[in-house]
Image: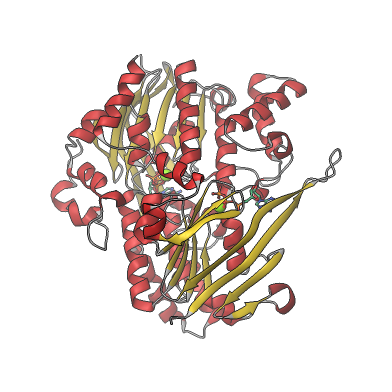
Amino acid sequence: MHLLEIENLVVEFETAAGPFRAVDGVSLHVDEGEVLAIVGESGSGKSVSMLAVMGLLPWTAKVSADAMRFAGRDLLSLTASQRRKIIGKDIAMIFQEPVASLNPCFTVGFQIEEVLRVHMGLDGKARRARAIELLNDVGIPDPEQRLGVFPHQMSGGQCQRVMIAIAIACNPKLLIADEPTTALDVTIQKQILDLLMNLQIETGMGMIMITHNMGVVAETADRVVVQYKGRKMEEADVLSLFEAPKHNYTKALLAALPDRATGDRLPTISSIFNEDVDGGAPA
Amino acid sequence: MSEVVLEGRNLVRDYHVGGGLFSSGRVVHAVKNVSFKVEKGKTLAIVGESGCGKSTLARIITMIDAPTSGDLLIDGDKVDIVKDGLTPEMRRKVQIVFQNPYGSLNPRQKIGDVLGEPLLVNTAMPAAERRDRAMQMLLKVGLGPEHFSRYPHMFSGGQRQRIAIARALMLNPRLLVLDEPVSALDLSVQAQVLNLLADLQDEFDLTYVFISHDLSVVRYIADDVMVMYFGEAVEYGSRERVFSDPRHDYTKTLFAATPRADVESIKARLARRAA
Ligand SMILES: Nc1ncnc2c1ncn2[C@@H]1O[C@H](COP(=O)(O)OP(=O)(O)OP(=O)(O)O)[C@@H](O)[C@H]1O
Ligand SMILES: Nc1ncnc2c1ncn2[C@@H]1O[C@H](COP(=O)(O)OP(=O)(O)OP(=O)(O)O)[C@@H](O)[C@H]1O
Ligand SMILES: [Mg+2]
Ligand SMILES: [Mg+2]
């Protein structure tokens, strides 16, 4: 049994111009203790497919799938109250836009302690101690002081780390990290990735790492799914992907690293990857 | 000698936080005595650890926030927003792309209107022309005509980032401050946006202050590099100098921590993991 199993997921949005298919038949799975990276171009449905797992899409979204199971339980047929018990505890997500995901009206400390209260049933003193410990783990200086500040008094990267602290607070079985280190410099990024990977080894949690940073993929993933325009293009273990990318889109993705720039303009995916020729069939 | 568009002299910014029930509050020294100069058509990149004061400095440069002390000069004129306020001329000249694009977009405004608004507020351009300009810019940042009448929440993270960049460019600014503009973007769009910025710089002699924590991006785009650490500029020099001869320990650490995407490193990691 896989920890998370998705078969043929389709998400369509109602828009003024008619329905728009953001996710078009994606299947994937993650096991306990495994790190799956999802890479793919902007707008290819990475966040939307994971928000569908979390049940957090707006009402304009129509979600269907042949299967969507977490630890054997059917996620599509959960009642709202069953879902609330799982989401945020057993399945936690680090959202892509940290500043927008934190509540501007509550202090950072309150927001961390709230998940500990709801899901872990800790008393006030234990919650506070755990909140300080979490802020310390994500590398925020003076954690005690910082409990009392509001999100707008923190830097972008500090907000992102508060989100991470909230997501790992309840030792989830599955952690979905949506671009978790975009706001962080490489030194803090390294600290955060080490933290997540150690936690992952310690607790055996499964992890889905959505990222556009091929360096992050190289440093964390066991397996990689490459997505393009709502579809899965390629799936491979991390070494094969870097050693011998099969799909032209994947090759283009690796070639677009600024490190590999020649001349005074960067190669773009479209200059390497011809959608008409390569775009049709999913891998 | 070329013109200096932007100059900071001993800029300082303190924040007072706390002062709640049990504590008397304290002062965060977010920016400590930072000085720099940027010439017309050049790019100054600012890198540094999360929380070291980059966005604070960006807000001072774009005259959103006043420094606690020190001077900001734009085109050689001293700017004091506390005393003199901000003229529409100044506002047009200097634009910013914020670090969190979602928070800076009005959720009730369609993208076409988001892009047209700066023109509506600052120019007498007729509606049809505003529409055309907005559409052109939308295409320039790699989005499609079908996006014109959608609302901000209907976009992916990377798409919203491009909308924020497009909006900042609508008024043909002279100085553009970009706060982590490409960090949320996948590589293809990142390349597209960086190329666009380079094209615009060539075309209009634009001056950029480019905040980023991605060294490969900085290396590609910057003329000069300033490294900040706990509010201080610990290193400041030409791109060539900083990359070939980093002097401060933090800069060296920064170079060493860059993730490795070569096959040998992946093999080594997998071996450690299996052990
Ligand atoms: N509420 C919505 N209404 C209509 N379209 C939407 C909505 N939310 C997302 N979309 C569209 O669905 C597509 C997939 O979005 P998603 O956020 O999953 O992209 P992504 O792969 O995470 O991209 P990024 O790397 O930029 O974050 C995009 O084209 C986006 O514009
Ligand atoms: N309004 C505020 N009130 C109090 N402290 C603040 C405020 N804004 C920022 N700070 C603090 O000032 C310091 C510098 O913040 P700033 O946002 O400039 O950092 P940054 O370099 O942009 O970081 P990042 O890379 O994470 O975005 C941080 O310690 C932050 O917590
Ligand atoms: Mg996304
Ligand atoms: Mg910042």
From this view, report whether residue A204 is shown above or below residue B18. above
Rendered residue at 53%/63% (across/down): B109
The part of the image, by quadrant, that contains residue A137 is top right
Most foreground residue, B69 or B214: B69
- Residue situated furthest left in the rendering: A277
Rendered residue at 47%/47% (across/down): B251
From this view, report whether residue B263 is shown above or below residue B119. above
| Residue A217, image x, y percentages | 34, 35
User: The N terminus of chain A appears in which quarter of the rendering?
Assistant: top left
Query: In this orientation, does residue B112 appear?
Result: no
| Residue B39, image x, y percentages | 46, 74
| Residue B32, image x, y percentages | 65, 57
User: The C terminus of chain A appears in which quarter of the rendering?
Assistant: top left
Q: Is residue B39 left or right of residue B190?
A: right
Instruction: Tell me how many marks there are.
Output: 0
Rendered residue at 86%/38% (across/down): B22
Query: In this orientation, does residue A169 appear?
Result: yes
The part of the image, by quadrant, that contains residue B81 is bottom right
Rendered residue at 16%/37% (across/down): A246
Most foreground residue, B94 or A80: B94
Q: Is residue B188 left or right of residue A49?
A: left
| Residue A260, image x, y percentages | 25, 50
Q: Is residue A237 left or right of residue B48?
A: left
From this view, report whether residue A141 is shown above or below residue B156. above
Most foreground residue, B101 or B214: B214
Coloring applied to the structure: secondary structure
